[in-house]
Image (spheres, rainbow, N blue to C red):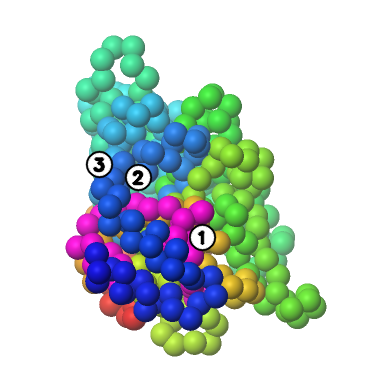
Amino acid sequence: MRGLLLALTLCLAGEAAASVSDVEHAAMLAADRRSAEAYILDQFADADLVLLGEDHAIRQTLAFVRDLVPQLHRAGVHNLVVEFGAEEDQHELDRLLTSPGYDADALKRLMFRYNSAWSWVEYRDLYEAAWRLNRSLPAGAPPFRIVNMSYVYRWHEFAAPRTPDVLQRVFWRGTVDGFRARVIEDQVLRRGEKALVLTGTPHAFTRYAMPRVEDNNEGFCGFDANWLGNRLLRRHPDRVVSVLVHQPFPNLPGRQPALVQPAQGAIERIMAELGNAPRGFDLKNAAMGALPDRSYYAMCHPDFTMADLFDGYLFLAPFRELEPATVDPGFVDASNIAEALRNYPDPDWKSPPRDLAGFRAHLAGMAEEIRNRYRSVE
């Protein structure tokens, strides 16, 4: 405990937001023996939606959510909402997850239909966990659902540069997060149910507005508050909680290294004092939330602290132990390579492959990029 107090004192010393009381309350984290699973389940006591902001394709995150599925159901949470699935396939997905046999090939095709480059095995493991749970339930028990909140984008319509006309052709059913918010309302909230929402970090922002440089605004700052979580919280106040999964933060523009540790490394130091045990903790209205952060997220936000970003935090492992999910080399083959190339996602972010060998090399490279990204965190 003395080592924890010393680490906290060093990282908070000199910060206006910090006080002796902050240090004393943060030290109480050592006495909170709730598991990471219990922390997430506890959030549903006061919320219908818990948005879990992930850095995509991290093995430990997906294993955590997979193993949480039966516990969610026992706690009365019967929905896992996922980003990587198409609303067009919801009826088929519901059927597959309640069918007598597990059809791995069919579920793989549904993942491909949404994103032809999303080969990660661990995302499909979520389907199998839901199916296994449903097979074990007594007659009459509500099934556990995985709800697809996205739709099939028409990437074959994309052409540089990005203009409103181009984006309207690609995102033909409307803005992505606007669509996702409507799906969650229809499939969860209007049914009087609860859901864990697994989504990329920016989409899970609720109270936080993403900054951007704007030449003609006062302070030269503009803000994007139209992410999924922002929209849901505006329309359903007090029903939405956001929890961030431990991940690197982007550095300020033009600064190196490109990625930095949250709270200037304080979280990793504190967790190391506690033996790096997986755990969740509050940021909003909590001492841990007073930890200052100087990453990109702090730009245009004076006196920025972790509590300004998310309501809670989930720590599963230190950066040196986090690993990419598993690439499925057979996700794209001779039977679907034409469609994979035709609807290759985000072609302006990375040049599309030209053939099957190139596509498979791209999939393998996605895993290596994650490894390199996490090794670079200082």
Sequence-wise, the earlier of marks 1 and 2 is 2
Between 301 and 91, the one lying in front of the other is 301
Q: Quadrant of the C terminus?
A: bottom left
Q: Which mark is residue 39?
A: 2
Other residues around mark 2 within 10 Å, as few (<14) / some (14–19) / many (≥20): some
Q: Is residue 252 left or right of residue 237?
A: left
Question: What residue is disc 3 on?
Answer: 67
Q: Residue at x 63, y 40 (%)?
A: 237
Amino acid type, callout 3: Asp
Question: Of tags 1 and 3, which is closer to the observer?
Answer: 1
Relative image position of residue 147 (x, y in whole percent): 45, 36
The verdict on residue 290 being magenta is yes
Q: Quadrant of the N terminus?
A: bottom left
Amino acid type, callout 2: Tyr
The verdict on residue 311 being magenta is no
Between 284 and 336, the one lying in front of the other is 284
Asked if 141 appears above or below 327 in the picture, the reply is above
Relative image position of residue 180 (x, y in whole percent): 56, 44
Question: What residue is disc 1 on?
Answer: 307
Magenta-colored span: 269-296
**Residue placed farthest to the left in the image?**
275
Sequence-wise, the earlier of marks 3 and 2 is 2
**Residue placed farthest to the front in the image?**
20
